[in-house]
Amino acid sequence: MDNSTLRFALSPLGVPELRSGSFGFVFRATEEGTGRQVAVKKSRVSKKVARSTLRHEACILQLLQGHGAIPALLGYCHFKHFEFIAMELLGPSVAEQKKDGAGLAALQHIHLLDIIHRDLRPVNILCAFHDPSTIKIIDFGISKSFSRGYSSKLKCEPQHLIGSLYWASLNSHNVEDLAPRDDIESLVLVVLYLVRGTLPWKPRSRLERPQRSKEVVRRTEAISTGPKLFAGFPDEFGWLLTYSCSLAFDGLPDYDDIRRRFTMVSERLGLSPDSGPLDWTPCYTTIVDNIETEHELGQYPDDDDGKIACDPNAILHCHLIGSDEDSYHEWDYAMWQLRG
């Protein structure tokens, strides 16, 4: 890979990629001359595409540089059939490490630069390679600019859920335009996953029709209040979900007030910034005590007389959609070009 004076050698063939997604792969690479280990994201795309995915992500990353929770951007290039981004090599995700970090401070930095992430989930929040206590937010491929004070929402056709099925905000499930409040809501869902070890809208079968899967998650999320989801935990967790849902479309969260409230939680629990890494072993308490069952939610669009729209016996043998499902399900290039 060549970008001005930077050259990177990708790992040899046969070495597994660090990560893969709908729009490409991430490999470990070595910077020639220094031996520095970096991460290189590779995507197949023609030069005829005016607004390629990685070029968009590189522009967002370049704008956000300078904050500790944003990975360092090292270079971008576009060849005939492929494009590449070279960036700081990071460690495992919080989904693997179950560690907390400065997620709120990172979102504050992003939002104050008029950017919304739109795809926050555990696998997009990584630990720094040499300092696991520091986190980095990655994958800005579907991020977009946000104009504060702009209250008339642009509707794009066709309308699809933006983000990832389990981690998207209720506004995203309702195909509403997204704002900083939705990033906060997704962050709360990440915290819920860390402390509970699961989400109430349990994994959907890959054999289930996509329309039904999305509707089950949407309806369950719609009736899941903060106090119900975080029952047994400090009230501030449930409050944050309620607060994020109450924000106006063009409003910014009160980051200082949120930080103050959770500082008080830490003090009540006898924790301090110097107390060392937190133990994020999930508390597997019942999460669905106050959540209605699918039967009680009623009939879904794909159902035939209320029956599940796929073979129930096959469900036992099929793969389940995990927390790292693709973020671009049902997207097409017409929608992609309108992402703003």
Image (tube, rainbow, N blue to C red):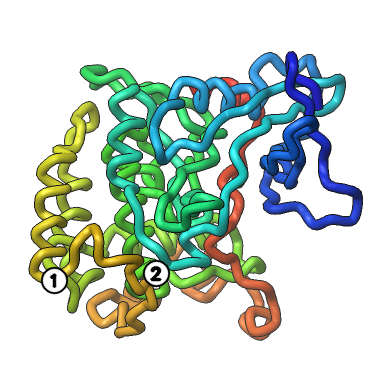
Query: Given the image, on which type of amino acid does mark 2 rest?
Result: Leu
Q: Position of residue 326 (x, y in %)?
A: 61, 51
Which residue does the numbered mark 1 point to in the structure image? 270
Dividing the image into 4 quarters, which one contains the N terminus? top right
Query: Given the image, on which type of amino acid does mark 1 rest?
Result: Gly
> Is residue 234 in view?
yes
| Number of numbered callouts drawn | 2
Q: Are marks 1 and 2 in contact (CB under 8 Å)?
A: no
Query: Which element carries disc 1, helix, strand or loop?
Result: loop
Q: Position of residue 310 (x, y in %)?
A: 63, 72
CA neighbours of label 1 inside 10 A, class few (<14), some (14 to 19), many (20+) = few
- Residue most extreme to the right: 13
Q: Nearer the viewer, residue 255 or 329?
A: 255
Q: Residue at x 76, y 40 (%)?
A: 30
Query: Which element carries disc 2, helix, strand or loop?
Result: loop
Q: Quadrant of residue 226?
A: bottom left
> Is residue 161 in view?
no
Which residue does the numbered mark 2 point to in the structure image? 199
Q: Nearer the viewer, residue 187 or 219?
A: 187
Q: Position of residue 142 (x, y in %)?
A: 52, 33
Q: Which mark, residue 228?
A: none
- Alpha carbons under labels 1 and 2: distance apart: 27 Å
Q: Position of residue 139 (x, y in %)?
A: 54, 40
